[in-house]
Amino acid sequence: MAPMNDHPGEQVAQDPVKLVAVRDTPLSLDEVFRAVGDTAAGGTALFVGTVRDHDGGADVDKLGYSCHPSAEAEMRRIAEKVVARYPVRALAAVHRVGDLGVGDLAVVVAVSCPHRGEAFEACRMLIDDLKHEVPIWKHQTFSDGTEEWVGAC
């Protein structure tokens, strides 16, 4: 029997970046999960970022996301960096822009890999790098009437 790493399913898939988008409409968990489906994947990790009702001890009423025109291209660059590091079978990342309320989905990313550990690690790298490197900004409005801009994601 051939070693596991010689099996095609243990390798990076052909064109594993299935979905990368910045949208001004509600995000779909089902769409992202379907995008990373792969019969050679033994593990799929999904991260969902939602608008919470507080930040830094203050109550959040709403927030808005805006982005630079290069945001989607930067998301793709990060996706390709993740694919270069892990044996990704499929990857998807979507981020919302516009006005969002508490509980709304702000970002959904998912990665499928041959094994769960790789899927978790790749998904963590994807969301962390997206958060730190993609030019998306958050404008928070607090219940006391104050507001704040927060850098990348």
Image: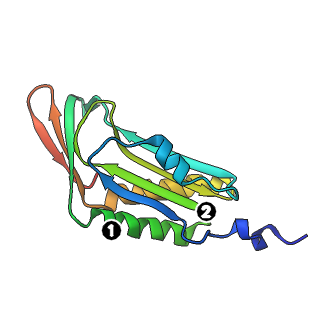
User: Does residue 68 sit above or below 109 in this rendering?
Assistant: below
Where disc 1 sits, the SS reads helix
Q: Amino acid at mark 1?
A: Ala
Q: Earlier in the sequence, mark 1 or mark 2?
A: 1
The N terminus: image quadrant: bottom right
* Mark number, residue 73: 1
User: Which residue is at a point 26% across and 55% down the rendered structure image?
Assistant: 152
Q: Position of residue 5 (x, y in %)?
A: 75, 70
Residue tagged 2: 89
User: Does residue 6 sit above or below 115 in this rendering?
Assistant: below
**Of the pair 62 and 147, the residue shown nearer to us:** 62
**Of the pair 74 and 125, the residue shown nearer to us:** 74
Q: Residues within 10 Å of mark 2 (few under 14, many from 20)?
A: many
Q: Position of residue 77 (x, y in %)?
A: 39, 70
Q: Amino acid at mark 2?
A: Arg
Q: How many marks?
A: 2
Q: Marks 1 and 2, how far apart in space?
A: 20 Å
Task: Tell whether 153 sits left or right of 10.
Answer: left
